[in-house]
Image: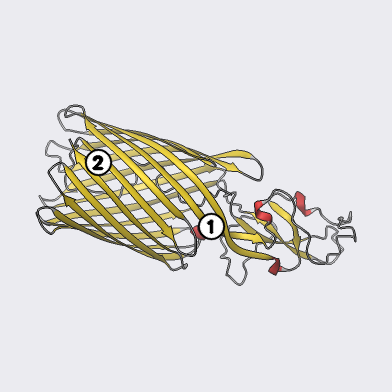
Amino acid sequence: MKNNNKAKLTLVALTSVVSAVLPLTTSAEDKVLIQAQHYGENDDRIKINDGKLIFEHDFGPDHTLNLEYNWDSVSGASPTWDSVSGASSTTHSDTVSGASPCIDEDGNYYDVCRDTRKINGIIGDGSVNLDDYVYRNVSLEDFRNSIAALYTYRTEEYRNELNLGMSYSKEDDFKNTGVSAEYLINTDKSRNRSVTVGASYMINDVYDYLDDKWNDFSLTNVQLGISQVFNRTTVAKVSIYGMKENGELSNPYFNVIRKINVISEPDEPNYFKYYLARDLRPDERQAGGISAQISNSVNKDNAFQSSYRYYQDTWGITSHTLDIKSYHHLTNQWRINPGLRYYNQSAANFFKAHDAKDSFFDEHGYASADHRLGKYDSWTMQLGFEYLQTNQLTWNLYTGYQSQSSGLKMSWVNFGAQYKY
């Protein structure tokens, strides 16, 4: 079984209108970069082996082309609601469990009762016993290939930059195609202040294994930012951004539990049963926020960078991200790069955790038990080492660890090399 929960870690690999990197200086270089990464989660959850190849080349001082190819294999399991007998992985009804006044001795529904199997999103025939359902890991395995390109053009006088990007990603149950454009305008020849306007658009296709069809949704993203160079050592950037998603935003691999009155006659007493049902989300989400970054070079051997990002959307989620990084030359050839990030998020207004006292939903309305839509905070620590073997060749090793208040823990190690030619 495939699962769309496996974190689309890099939808647009080379360019994003919500950037997290603010270098003190920007200069294009001819280089080739190769990276390999292993990522793993606790509780026998997701494991990813990832590879990346990046090629960057200058065609004179005004034109730069950046190409990236990425491949990764995903395996492991992801948690969701399921029946004890495993109805979530089948397209037919589950075995009826529990006595019901709606079912005769042969297991057929009486005419006075609603055939719940016809209700949109219901999986199986339900049960009067909530213990017939369990929140457990469902196995998954997949492989993804992606390619992205970014072209940069610089004007002659003010050195304004136009960036045009495109990307494509494919796996068995998910496809993504994206385009982006960003224009950086220097307000004068000194380039101490610049304004950045950017936009991106992505169309995604997700396979629904129960309905045996492809559904699509789109993502539009816009940003406006201002960068200011204060002196030779300090530069800052403030941006506002907005996003809009449209289409089939429900995840076909996540389930919830619904409590449904199966008696259809209004004069009959209520009789409730629990049903495994599909994840159901609104078909539109609007979001926006602000981000701020500042970089400071203390001296030639030490630099610091910090950023803050605020996010809010129409699903009721708000988040705060605080990121601190530093760069330290230990010798002429060795550099160490520690980093620390704190993230805090509120829950979507239609989310219920699997371990909540009221973990089930009513018959109608949006519903999700996807842990990524819940309330949690996390701490992320990362440590990087770079070895400058020559002026052209640099080796790097990064390792990181994240712990979430939800109990999820993850770690990764990334190894690669960069060659300037």
Q: Amino acid at mark 1?
A: Ser
Relative placement, left or right, of 266 versus 166 is right
Give the Cα distance between marks 1 and 2: 42 Å
- N-term mark: 1 or 2: 1
Q: Amino acid at mark 2?
A: Val
Quarter residue 15 falls in: top left
Instruction: Say if residue 44 shows up in the picture.
Output: yes
Q: Position of residue 117 (x, y in %)?
A: 76, 51
Relative placement, left or right, of 162 versus 364 is left
Q: Which residue is mark 2?
A: 195
Instruction: Say if residue 16 shows up in the picture.
Output: no
Q: Position of residue 53 (x, y in %)?
A: 32, 40
**Residue at the extreme bottom:** 357
Q: Residues within 10 Å of mark 2 (few under 14, many from 20)?
A: some
Relative placement, left or right, of 335 versus 238 is left
Q: Position of residue 131 (x, y in %)?
A: 69, 69
Residue in view at x 24 percent, y 58 percent? 325
Q: Which mark is residue 78?
A: 1
Q: Position of residue 315 (x, y in %)?
A: 51, 54
